[in-house]
Image (tube, rainbow, N blue to C red):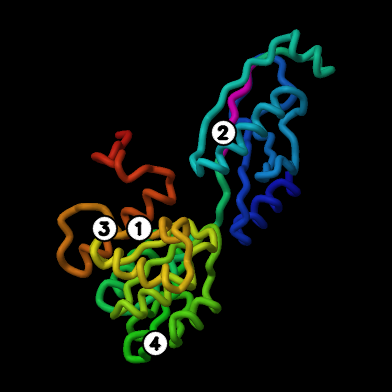
């Protein structure tokens, strides 16, 4: 058990994609009882076991699907005596298994430290994101304005990007003061496998910046990564409301919810 928990913790700390598989209930004779765990990686490697055989193979497959979709699932498996016999097991019962993705804390990389960036950094931190902020103006990128940020950088955006956490569990939001800064920041992050790349602005602005990036040699498939306009349509007007809109979209992406499917929140009352 300790080996499994340590593997899960390492995956969380490194932001390494993995899934934790836990047997939550059993009926009849099963190879493992409630509490058995294993960690599954995208390539099918496992740490720990929930009993081997066909049930484990099925749950490894489902775990890899969970890693891909980033959505937890509760799975049931009926182990018949015939199946158990084929795997060399003497059992036959039912197992319920909970599979949850492990990703670690996501990182918001803010390019630009203006009026929208400030409330967005605060809200993202409250929502569980690491926050890194970059701007080429010291009077904007400083600890007084961003006291909760994990990293504050005063550099040109391309140089700042080299110091930021840009990976599979990172969310880049580009809110610089001008088109040149936007283009520089986007050039630095596109094509690096980020979870989310958003540009604050209108469709015409995106067309203009995309044309400039094409002239720099960026291929169309990279430009397609840009979300613009970014945020969910909630009628936001103030910087704080715009920050809420952007964060809501980031959370939807984090939880595997397509923005087009977003409706009233579903809550289970006690």
Q: Are marks 3 and 2 in contact (CB under 8 Å)?
A: no
How far across and how far down the image is residue 100, in percent? 55, 41
| Magenta stretch, overall SS | strand
Residue underneath mark 1? 227
Q: Earlier in the sequence, mark 3 or mark 4?
A: 4
Label 3: how many Cα within 10 Å (few below 14, some 14–19, many 20+)? many
Which quadrant holds the C terminus? top left
Structural crowding at the residue carrying mark 4, measured as other residues with C-alpha within 10 Å and reported as few (<14), some (14–19) or many (≥20): some
- Assign a secondary structure to mark 2: strand
Instruction: Provide the residue span drawn in magenta.
Output: 94-99
Q: Is there any visible trace of residue 51 in the rendered image? A: yes
Seen in the image, is 208 located left or right of residue 16?
A: left
Provide the residue designation for mark 4: 136
* Observer-nearest of 85 and 226: 226
Q: Earlier in the sequence, mark 1 or mark 3?
A: 1
Camera-side residue of 219 and 77: 219
Q: Earlier in the sequence, mark 2 or mark 4?
A: 2
**Discs 2/1, front:** 1
Tell me if residue 22 comes above or below residue 167 in the rendering: above
Residue 146 x, y percent position in the rendering:
36, 79
Foreground mark, 3 or 4, reads 4
What SS does tag 1 mark? strand
- The residue at the point 57 percent across, 22 percent down is 76
List the residue tagged with mark 2.
Answer: 98
């Amino acid at each position: 058990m300790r080996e499994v928990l340590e593997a899960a913790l390492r995956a969380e700390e490194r932001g390494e994609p993995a899934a934790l598989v836990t047997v939550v209930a059993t009926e009849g004779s099963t190879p493992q009882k409630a509490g058995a765990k294993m960690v599954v990686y995208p390539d099918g490697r496992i740490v720990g076991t929930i009993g081997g055989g066909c049930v484990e193979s099925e749950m490894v497959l489902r775990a890899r699907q969970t890693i891909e979709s980033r959505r937890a699932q509760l799975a049931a498996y009926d182990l018949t005596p015939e199946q158990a016999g084929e795997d060399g097991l003497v059992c036959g019962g039912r197992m319920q298994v909970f599979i949850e993705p492990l990703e670690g804390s996501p990182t918001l990389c803010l390019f630009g430290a203006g009026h929208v960036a400030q409330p967005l950094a605060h809200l993202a931190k409250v929502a569980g994101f690491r926050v890194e902020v970059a701007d080429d103006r010291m009077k904007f990128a400083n600890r007084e304005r961003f006291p909760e940020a994990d990293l504050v950088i005063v550099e040109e955006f391309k140089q700042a990007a080299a110091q930021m956490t840009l990976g599979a569990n990172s969310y880049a939001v580009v809110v610089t003061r001008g088109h040149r800064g936007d283009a520089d920041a986007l050039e630095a992050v596109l094509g690096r496998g980020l979870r989310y790349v958003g540009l604050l602005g209108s469709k015409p602005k995106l067309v203009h910046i995309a044309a400039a990036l094409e002239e720099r040699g960026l291929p169309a498939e990279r430009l397609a990564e840009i979300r613009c306009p970014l945020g969910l349509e909630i009628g936001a007007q103030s910087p704080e409301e715009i920050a809420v809109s952007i964060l809501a979209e980031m959370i939807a992406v984090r939880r595997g919810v397509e923005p087009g499917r977003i409706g009233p929140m579903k809550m289970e009352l006690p």
